[in-house]
Image (tube, rainbow, N blue to C red):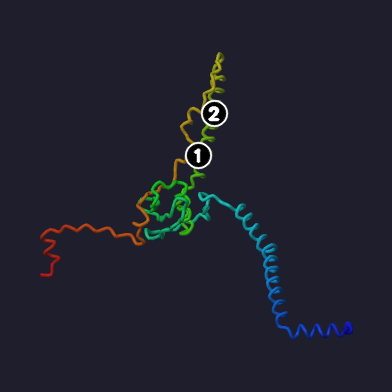
Amino acid sequence: MDELCNDDEYAMHCNECIDNNPLLKFFFLTSFIPFTVFFSMWVVAKFVYEPSINNTIEEEEEIFIPYEEKYPIKEHLSKDNININNFVFENTPNGTVFMRYNKENEDFEYWCDDKQIPYKYLETVSRKFVNYFQCQNLYIDRKKEIELQKTRKKELLESKKKKEDEKEEAEEENSVFAKLKPKVETESKVKNIDVDVAVRGNKYKYMSKIKDFTFIPERKKEEAKKLSFNEWKKSSWF
């Protein structure tokens, strides 16, 4: 019966066995490396990627802005160098829109494949235009116009009521047998003032579809000037 190895001899023979057997190293590496790779991927996914995705989703939910409220008017500026070649394009919920401003007609001209694009989307594109070219004076803010109309209506009602009260007081003082007159409903005199719809607003003109838009507008053909025979003779070289 062979004698048993002591601990030192066993360790020495085991180390020699491992060093002289490349398969053991191979199997060790093939099992250890994938484990470390997948473990590191799990750590990154669990503690880095997943929290960042959740934060991004929360931020997007918090800062979500409806399209019709985009491009709020910045500083009120007025530039006179706006011309027919200045334009912007914007991807709206109803498709792409090209827009420019026509100073002669004082309106915004636009090209879009959807002719029935909502007015509120055109308002958004026009705000982008005036902000980009710094001509905010061209834009008429409907919300501000409605607020002004409400203020005017309130002031008119107060003024009418004050005049009626003063008139009744004067009549009571001038007549001993004055009879109290029913107060006039002043609201009926200004009921035709609609405070829910802006009186003033931006004008938009549909031009055509996107395919018909040209970056450089065609020049209008000048009408041929009619010359009399004497004028033609003077202008000719013979």
Q: Where the C terminus falls, by quadrant?
A: bottom left
Distance of mark 2 from mark 1, alpha carbons?
18 Å
Label 2–label 1 contact, CB within 8 A: no
Residue found 73% across the figure and 83% down from its top: 21
Residue 163: give x, y in percent of width and height.
Answer: 53, 28
Q: Which residue is mark 2?
A: 161
Q: Going from the N terminus, do you reach mark 2 or mark 1 first?
A: 1
* Residue depicted at 67% across the width and 67% down the height: 41
Locate residue 110 relative to residue 147 in the image: left or right.
left
User: Can you tell which quarter of the image residue 86 is in?
Assistant: bottom left
Q: Residue furthest top?
A: 177
Residue 192 placed where, x, y %? 46, 32
Look at mark 1 in the image and give the residue it sits on: 149
Q: Is residue 221 left or right of residue 109?
A: left
128 shown above or below 192: below
Left or right, 99 with reference to 5: left
- Given the image, on which type of amino acid does mark 1 rest? Gln
Residue at x-position 86% and y-position 85%: 9
Q: In terms of depth relative to the viewer, which is nearer, 102 or 76?
A: 102
Q: Circle 2: is it few (<14), some (14-19), or many (20+) Cα within 10 Å?
A: some
Q: Nearer the viewer, residue 148 or 163?
A: 148
Residue lying at 19% horizontally and 58% vertically, measured from the top left: 225
Q: Position of residue 226 (x, y in %)?
A: 16, 57
Quarter of image, res 213: bottom left
Q: Position of residue 77 (x, y in %)?
A: 49, 56
Disc assigned to residue 162: none
Mark 2 falls on what kind of element? Answer: helix
Within 10 Å of disc 1 (Cα), the crowding (few <14, some 14-19, many 20+) is some
| In-front residue for pair 24/51 | 24
Labels 2, 1: front one:
1
